[in-house]
Amino acid sequence: MPYEVIDSVFRAWANRRNLQVFTRYQDSDVRTVFLHGADAQRGQIWVDPPSKSGMVAIHFAVYRRRGQDNQTSVANAEPERLEEMLEEAYGTVVEWLNEAS
């Protein structure tokens, strides 16, 4: 399934959080946002297109300087719960970013 199925939810959520949506990485379609923390830390939340069963994988991570102590996780959501799961992922990334501050 293409991203178009979830684009409106993902873009509206990102807009409410004042996050820029990136849609291309190298030559691939993506849907991702970045959050920035202290000391060159960077958080990222991205989603895969819905699977054939309709589930959406939400990936979230914090990358620390020199790749030490990175944290990553993934959650799966039905499209109707996508916004709720994005909020949970956002909260987790913010918490991870604050841990090192």
Image (spheres, grey):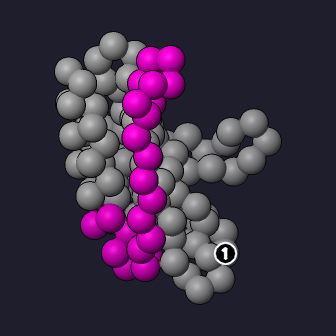
Is residue 17 found left or right of 76 in the rendered image?
A: left
Residue 75 location in percent, x, y?
A: 42, 65
Decide if residue 80 is in sight here.
yes
- For the point 58% across and 72% down, which residue is it? 50
Residue 51 location in percent, x, y?
A: 62, 76
Please check the rendered image and state whether residue 72 is part of the magenta-colored stretch, yes or no: yes
Check disc 1 and report its element: helix, strand or loop: loop
Q: Which residues are magenta?
A: 63-85
- For the point 62% across and 50% down, which residue is it? 30
Please check the rendered image and state whether residue 67 is part of the magenta-colored stretch, yes or no: yes
**Relative depth, front residue between 42 and 2:** 42
Residue picked out by circle 1: 1
Crowd around label 1: few <14 · some 14–19 · many ≥20 (10 Å): few
Is residue 2 found left or right of 89 in the rendered image?
A: right
Q: Amino acid at mark 1?
A: Met
- For the point 55% across and 82% down, which residue is it? 54
Q: Is residue 93 above or below residue 89?
A: above
Q: Residue furthest bottom?
A: 53
Tell me the quadrant of the picture where the C terminus can be found. top left
Q: Is residue 68 above or below residue 44?
A: above
Decide if residue 16 is in sight here.
no
